[in-house]
Amino acid sequence: MQAVNVGIIGLGNVGSGTLAILTENAEQIALKLGFQLRVKALCSRSLNTKQQPEDSIFRTADWREVVAHPEVDIVAELVGGTQVSREIIDGAIAHKKSVVTANKELMALCGAEIWDRAISAGINLAMEASVAGGIPIHTVLREGISGDRVTTLYGILNGTSNYILTEIEKHGSSFDSVLQEAQRLGYAEADPSADVDGYDARSKLAILAALAFGEKITPSDIYTEGIRRILPLDFQYAHKLGHTIRLICGAHQTPAGLILSVRPALIPQSTILAGVQGAYNAVWVRGKYGQDTFYYGRGAGAKPTGVAVVSDLMRVAREIRSGSPERVSPFAHERLGEYRPVSVVLQTRGYYLRFRVKDRPGILAGLSGILAAKSISLDAVLQLPTGTKRDLPFVITVEPTYEHAIREAVAQMAQLDFLLEPPLALPMETAL
Ligand SMILES: NC(=O)c1ccc[n+]([C@@H]2O[C@H](COP(=O)([O-])OP(=O)(O)OC[C@H]3O[C@@H](n4cnc5c(N)ncnc54)[C@H](OP(=O)(O)O)[C@@H]3O)[C@@H](O)[C@H]2O)c1
């Protein structure tokens, strides 16, 4: 059967990993497909500095020459961002080329619209690499467990944040020093905000939740909070409570609707998610019929993400050669009602409240008075022998209560003059 030709735009981490796999693994890929998947064109602005195969591949610094190349069947958009990448994908669709992308940000923002245009143009759009790098979670939700009815999805979807949290946990180092080390090792970007403030994970959760629940989800539906305020002592208190802390991407169905959040949370040390260390990612899905399934692997990196891109290229190539059935959007365009996103303040959880205070009499009475006025029941008060009288940390945990009550209480507490900073409130997840 005639070969299917690929044009790769972007030869950074993912592009170079993809190229290496397509080159080194070409023979086995051809055996699995029954035809060759050939790299026909390569594009990067600094092509000369990139390691490339020796043969007669068309090379350019102008992506327009790849999307317009008459022999390219599939364009791999591996540039990232939302501007040039959007132009590349639009250009590819205009030239009736199928697209494989690793771009979570663009897919979360306007994937539904791009999908419609791709399908109307009779081509395909695949995005496995956009979420959780080497874990084939898109395929799992789209095919593997698509017959189930998902009720809850929890993920650790940002490797940088997970690396930082687990380093703070292991070594008791501060957020800033672990971040600097992560930047030195290349695990964190020079501008770490997308990772540590939760935005990268939010894009991934938007894509996964749309697929899992068949509901239209946008990033703005997701309550997002990063990990900058987590201190080593939060892990000491969490451990005392039999928990640890992870940046949890959560989507769960409640009678009110779908509650979506990306935020640091206490999770029991006994749960499988607590064992996810370093830069690894994991997704845990609960279905009404199939119950629990768990997926684990490398969330990023040239080769793991490259595998996801190459596997998408193989699937799209198969469809090009064998014809493709009519497809339904993975982005769900309708609000179905049952899974309508609702505010996180409707969530009921136990909460961990951590305070840093200037020590003086009456502190506990002041704080517990505010909780009592909101009908929030205290569960435990913990104070480890750390700190000084001028900066004394302690923790109150409370029984399950509505998040809106906790937020009101925390806002009121933040006005108290003995607090050195507003209280840190983290949900305590039990449903894992
Ligand atoms: N890194 C990961 O592990 C990972 C995992 C999952 C998903 N992703 C996603 O994969 C995508 C790529 O990420 P990455 O880490 O590989 O990024 P990267 O290392 O920064 O690579 C981006 C590449 O795009 C090229 N590029 C930028 N603007 C261009 C333009 N106008 N024309 C042609 N080439 C251009 C750059 O070439 P020059 O250097 O020559 O400018 C560079 O080779 C992003 O959407 C990212 O979110 C990454």
Image: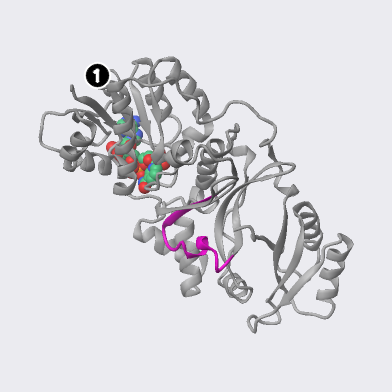
Q: Is residue 8 left or right of residue 403?
A: left
Q: Position of residue 384 (x, y in %)?
A: 65, 81
Q: Quadrant of the N terminus?
A: top left
Q: Identify residue type, mark 1.
A: His
Please indicate, yes or no, whether residue 52 appears anywhere in the rendered image. no
**Region in magenta:** 268-285
Residue at x 27%, y 38% (from the top left corner): 11
Label 1 sits on a secondary structure element that is loop
129 drawn magenta: no
User: Along the line of sight, which residue is nearer the eye, 182 or 219?
Assistant: 219
Quadrant observed for ligand 1 in the rendered image: top left
Q: Is residue 369 left or right of residue 103?
A: right
Q: Position of residue 279 (x, y in %)?
A: 41, 58
Looking at the rendering, which quadrant does residue 402 occupy?
Answer: bottom right
Q: Which residue is mark 1?
A: 69
Residue at x 19%, y 28% (from the top left corner): 35
User: Along the line of sight, which residue is nearer the eye, 35 or 45?
Assistant: 35
